[in-house]
Image (spheres, helix red, strand yellow):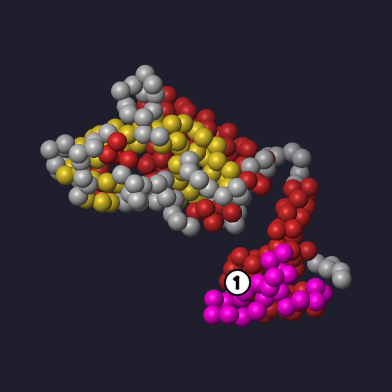
């Protein structure tokens, strides 16, 4: 058995992710006929069907499942070995960061300004969604800013700071619970400080919440310090990235830049 084209292995790994020749073609920027042709060649060279059709799409065979992690590691190691030893920010094409909306409001401007001082790359900063973890693993997103929680070992989390909450708004009005994806959909952290309060308005849009502060109140994230009167809510903010990419030159640079921006902004806000 001999596979002469490493691109065919990339097609295989993409099919393992997408379970569809059409979606794989779109992700790789190739035609569906090309993906089908490569799959046919792989089936012949590996002497295995690799995928069977089902109602959910292409289902991998037991052989495909067994070789996928080994091929993934091998290609990652090969890619890392081909990366240049010197890293230059001017050669970066695009930077993609996902973060919880309150964090992007607080730190986004300073992060963008710091990036722009070093590179003209396209900057894409978006709100964190339920798809963000998968996009980090698929390397569509470089880094995320989120709450430190239980995550798979394929995601590396580095704590930035401990966050707390500060009550703001019209405390004679109703309580608004701001819903942050992956943080508090099923937990009312505010009740550790306001045990008798029940939320009667739920929003996931920060601007709308701001517009309601004249008639209602909420608890906003704030950097925790033992020297303040803020409550300790057990909320740690972290940088999230793919474990296998955390020591790549781009990620190391981005991590250092974001850490500096966050610390400077927190010190300024105190």
Whole-percent x, y for residue 147 in the image: 45, 42
Residue 76, placed above or below residue 193? below
**Residue linked to disc 1:** 19
Q: Is residue 84 left or right of residue 163?
A: right
Q: How many labels were placed on the picture? A: 1
Give the quadrant of the N terminus.
Answer: bottom right
- Viewer can see residue 95: no
Q: Is residue 157 left or right of residue 50?
A: left
User: Within the magenta stretch, is there residue 60?
Assistant: yes
SS category of the residue bearing label 1: loop
Of 30 and 221, nearer the camera is 221
Residue 131, placed above or below residue 221? below
Which residue is located at x 76 percent, y 76 percent?
48
Give the quadrant of the C terminus.
Answer: top left
Badge 1 crowding class, 10 Å Cα cut-off, few under 14, some 14 to 19, many 20 or more, is: many
User: Within the magenta stretch, is there residue 265?
Assistant: no
Q: Which residues are magenta?
A: 45-66
Residue 116, placed above or below residue 53? above
Of 64 and 15, nearer the camera is 64
Whole-percent x, y for residue 238 in the image: 50, 38
Q: Quadrant of residue 195?
A: top left
Which residue is located at x 39 percent, y 21 percent?
226
Whole-percent x, y for residue 102 in the image: 37, 42
Q: Which residue is the extreme one toward the left?
A: 172
- Viewer can see residue 193: yes
Which residue is located at x 45 percent, y 36 percent?
236
Whole-percent x, y for residue 244 in the image: 66, 47
């Amino acid at each position: 058995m001999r596979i002469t084209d490493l691109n065919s292995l990339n097609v295989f790994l993409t099919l393992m992710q997408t379970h569809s020749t059409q979606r794989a073609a779109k992700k790789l920027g190739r035609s569906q006929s090309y993906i089908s042709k490569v799959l046919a060649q792989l089936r012949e060279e590996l002497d295995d069907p690799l995928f069977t059709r089902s109602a959910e799409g292409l289902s991998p065979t037991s052989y495909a499942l067994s070789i996928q992690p080994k091929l993934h590691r091998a290609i990652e190691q090969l890619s890392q070995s081909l990366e240049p030893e010197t890293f230059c920010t001017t050669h970066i094409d695009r930077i993609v960061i996902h973060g919880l909306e309150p964090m992007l409001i607080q730190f986004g401007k300073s992060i963008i300004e710091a990036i722009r001082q070093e590179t003209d790359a396209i900057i894409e900063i978006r709100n964190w969604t339920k798809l963000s973890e998968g996009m980090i693993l698929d390397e569509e997103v470089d880094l995320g800013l989120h709450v430190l929680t239980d995550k798979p070992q394929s995601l590396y989390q580095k704590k930035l700071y401990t966050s707390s909450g500060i009550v703001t708004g019209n405390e004679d009005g109703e309580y608004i619970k701001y819903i942050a994806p992956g943080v508090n959909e099923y937990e009312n952290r505010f009740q550790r400080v306001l045990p008798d309060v029940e939320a009667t308005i739920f929003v996931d849009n920060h601007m709308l919440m701001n517009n309601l502060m004249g008639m209602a109140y909420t608890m906003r994230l704030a950097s925790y310090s033992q020297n303040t009167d803020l409550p300790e809510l057990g909320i740690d903010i972290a940088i999230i990235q793919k474990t296998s990419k955390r020591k790549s030159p781009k990620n190391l640079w981005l991590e250092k830049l974001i850490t500096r921006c966050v610390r400077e902004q927190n010190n300024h806000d105190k």
